[in-house]
Image (cartoon, grey):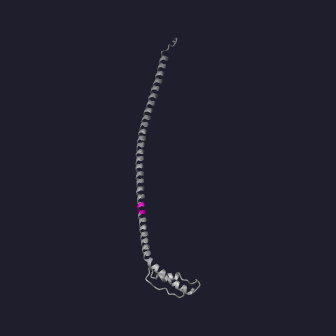
Amino acid sequence: MGGTEVPRGSGVLGFDGEAILSLCLSDTSPDEGLIEDLTVEDKAVEQLAEGLLSHYLPDLQRSKQALQELTQNQVVLLDTLEQEISKFKECHSMLDINALFAEAKHYHAKLVNIRKEMLMLHEKTSKLKKRALKLQQKRQKEELEREQQREKEFEREKQLTARPAKRT
């Protein structure tokens, strides 16, 4: 390998395949011409790397661009999805609110009916109290009349009972 230049050929990466093979499969010992081999190998490595990069870099850049676009599209989709979820939650909460209002209306109607019944019961109890008072007054009056009748009868009997006549 001692001082051999790497020829440029028309290979896939811009190198001649035979020259590269000759560099790799040389009969020289690893220590022989080490500094020269390094410069030749460094050049070969640099040229191989440039060839490799020039071959794959455009595809990788296109892939990177496509991935960036996909990532942006995913972000847009996630934002849209979050908005739709919030709309569904809002609709669900509206349904809950509507159900609560319907329930409140139902219980309000029950309360109105209970109030009507309580007013009706109050009126009935007031009427019954008045009637009971009248009946009590009537009984007391009748009792008083009976008592007075008894007293009259007692007085009458007292007057009818025979009295001894007075002598004069």
The image quadrant of residue 115 is: top left
How far across and down, in percent of the image, does residue 43 sit? 51, 84
- Count the marks: 0
How far across and down, in percent of the image, does residue 97 sit? 42, 54
Q: Quadrant of the N terminus?
A: bottom right
- For image coordinates 41% across by 40% down, the residue present is 117
Examine the rendered structure and indicate whether residue 139 appears above or below residue 121: above
- For image coordinates 48% across by 21% down, the residue present is 150
Examine the rendered structure and indicate whether residue 162 appears above or below residue 146: above
Q: Residue furthest bottom?
A: 3
How far across and down, in percent of the image, does residue 149 sit? 46, 22
From the viewer's side, name the closer residue of 85 and 113: 85
The magenta segment is: 81-85
How far across and down, in percent of the image, does residue 57 sit? 44, 77
Examine the rendered structure and indicate whether residue 60 appears above or below residue 32: above
The image quadrant of residue 65 is: bottom left
From the viewer's side, name the closer residue of 163 and 149: 149
Q: Residue furthest right?
A: 31
- For image coordinates 41% across by 47% down, the residue present is 106
Q: Is residue 138 magenta?
A: no
From the viewer's side, name the closer residue of 164 and 160: 160
From the viewer's side, name the closer residue of 55 and 6: 6
Examine the rendered structure and indicate whether residue 64 appears above or below residue 43: above
- Magenta stretch: helix, strand or loop mostly: helix
- For image coordinates 43% across by 38% down, the residue present is 121
Q: Is residue 82 magenta?
A: yes
Q: Residue furthest front?
A: 27
